[in-house]
Amino acid sequence: MVTSSQINQTLENIYISPLESCNLNCSLCYTRKTRNILGNKQILDFVDRYQKQVNLKSVLFCGGEVFGKRNFHQLINELTRMKIFITIITNGTIDQLKEINDPRNCQLLVSLDGPKEIHDANRGKGNFQKSISFIKKALSLGFPTEIMFLVTPASYLYKDSFSDYLCSCLFPSKPSNPPNFNYITVKTSFFNPKLNFPGLAPDQILDIKKNYSSIPDKNFGCFQLSLQSDGQIYGCCESSIPIAKITDPIDKILENFKKSLTPCQKCGECGGCCQPEFLCGYIKELGVKNCQEVVKLINKVKSQSSKVKTKS
């Protein structure tokens, strides 16, 4: 059940997608590449108004590719100066790392699609090595760095071996503190009808959700106030239902966000969702009727996490 305490804690950590454009053209990307861009001043003005009512602790940035945004590093430097912890989801092919003043307070989540051949088949030749070089540099500069492993039908075969494979690419000898891994199951055409890419089979999705450290967590509860590049605010980064605009009073934004969680405050099957009829696309992906059935399927058997070979 979603509690008031959980909601208040969530509001201290927000998500911002300042643009949807990207320097790559991945074959399985479902993001609609609009021309919308939020300027640094728009974001900072919003954060300033938000901070006056909420103890904002962190901002997670994603796109598109956020390092493709002009003067993005200046935005990061200003936010970390304000004592806000930053997390950036990136493809790791645009290097602005030395322009970021406080790497210890800027976490990087680098997305990879599997071993070199699989990754480059999706993202373009040479991009796996670019990301490897980016990760090495990030670690050397002191950025907290994690790997987001996108599990596709091709990379599913490497779910147990990819972490070792990646470490062999990153380090000349066995590392004492390798990057953490999180698994994400590939989305299909639910988000973008034009996307012609095969998804995982239901049993493969359930295997990842039950037995691996994945995003979102198998009990969900991953809702987060999300400012998108069109200036609309949503209840999470993948919701399709706007709840407010960037220019709305913060009181209105907070009230609408809490209202979006009303159904989950009465259910208690999982950690909650701002759009339970969607639930990250898993209702369609698993071919079930509702969010409760998704949660029951994922939690049907005890997690066999002892089988997982991810590093921690």
Image (cartoon, rainbow, N blue to C red):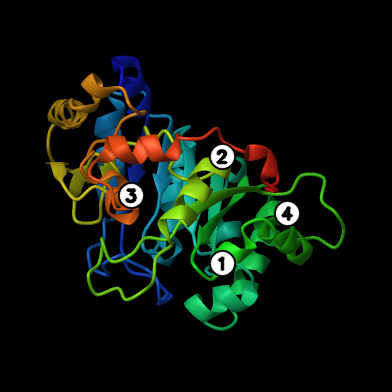
The answer to which of marks 4 and 3 sits earlier in the sequence is 4
Looking at the rendered structure, the kind of residue marked 2 is Asn
Q: Residues within 10 Å of mark 4 (few under 14, many from 20)?
A: few
Residue that carries the numbered disc 1 in the rendered image = 155
Question: For the residue carrying disc 3, how many other residues have a C-alpha within 10 Å: few (<14), some (14-19), or many (20+)?
Answer: many
Q: Amino acid at mark 4?
A: Ser
Whether residues under marks 3 and 2 lie with C-beta atoms below 8 angstroms apart, the answer is: no
Q: CA distance from mark 2 to mark 1?
A: 31 Å
The mark found on residue 140 in the picture is 4
Q: Give the position of the C terminus as an image quadrant.
A: top right
Q: Distance from label 3 to label 1 (Cα)?
A: 19 Å
* Residue 105: mark in rendering: 2
Q: How many marks?
A: 4
Above or below: residue 277 compared with residue 270: below
User: Which amino acid, mark 1?
Assistant: Ser
Residue 282, numbered label: 3
Can residue 161 be seen?
yes
